[in-house]
Image (spheres, grey):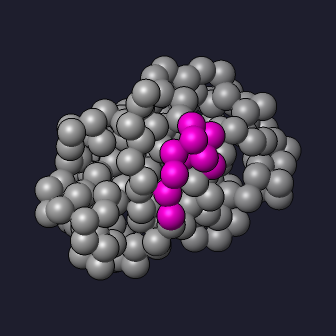
Amino acid sequence: MLNLPKLILASGSPRRAEILNSVGWEFEKVVADIDETEFEGENPADYVQRLAKEKAEFVAAKHSNKMVLGADTTVVINDQIIGKPVDLNDARRMLKLLSGSWHEVLTGVSVVKNGSTKVGLQRTKVKFSDLSDNAIEFLVKFGEPLDKAGAYAVQAQAALFIEGIEGDYWNVVGLPISLVYQLVEKFD
């Protein structure tokens, strides 16, 4: 039998919770309230790994002897971080930028237990078809873009416009569960 130790998920993301639930991983959620500002000159891979680590360590400081999972996901196009849109016009801008192009989804994952921290990174490439103005308005109206990196959810309305995915699908949803398992295994 696999040993899936109970986790504390240092995230309020409903998608991360759904992924953990889908594989039968027992967890509780404790939202990590940290500053997510990018450091000047920080590259996207370092950024998501730093935030994942900070989230996990923030929650772990209040929950000793528990295993804490932190994660952070961002969309990157032309080496530029495309985070969550600040408003619907920003969502439109992001979707226009992603239209007809490949981009990368990066997720930093961190697992902390008893003062020990393991950190990993997952990269997945995603290609959108050319998005018409009507398609963009559809995604803005029905895709709930404001709480999603890149203003889209691959598992929802945006699936209509995804031409290709290279890599871990679950990473694009918000949690590369295989990487989580690999990091947890390092504690045994």
Q: Is residue 38 visible?
A: no
Q: Say above or below: 142 vs 87.
A: above
Q: How many marks?
A: 0
Q: Is residue 27 left or right of residue 78?
A: right
Q: Is residue 160 left or right of residue 72?
A: right
Q: Position of residue 90 (x, y in %)?
A: 61, 63
Identify the residue at horizontal 20%, vertical 48% (top origin): 118
The furthest residue to the front = 1
Between 20 and 16, the one nearer to me in the picture: 20
The furthest residue to the left = 116
Between 95 and 58, the one nearer to me in the picture: 58
Identify the residue at horizontal 46%, vertical 72% (top origin): 30
Taking the magenta stretch, the answer to whether it contains residue 38 is no
Q: Say above or below: 40 vs 188.
A: below
Q: Is residue 152 visible?
A: yes
Identify the residue at horizontal 33%, vertical 48% (top origin): 109
Identify the residue at horizontal 51%, vertical 45% (top origin): 25
Q: Is residue 166 left or right of residue 135?
A: left
Q: Position of residue 131 (x, y in %)?
A: 73, 36
Region rendered in magenta = 18-28
Q: Position of residue 79 (x, y in %)?
A: 33, 42
Quadrant for residue 188, please give it: top left
Quadrant for residue 58, please give it: bottom left
Q: Position of residue 107 (x, y in %)?
A: 39, 45
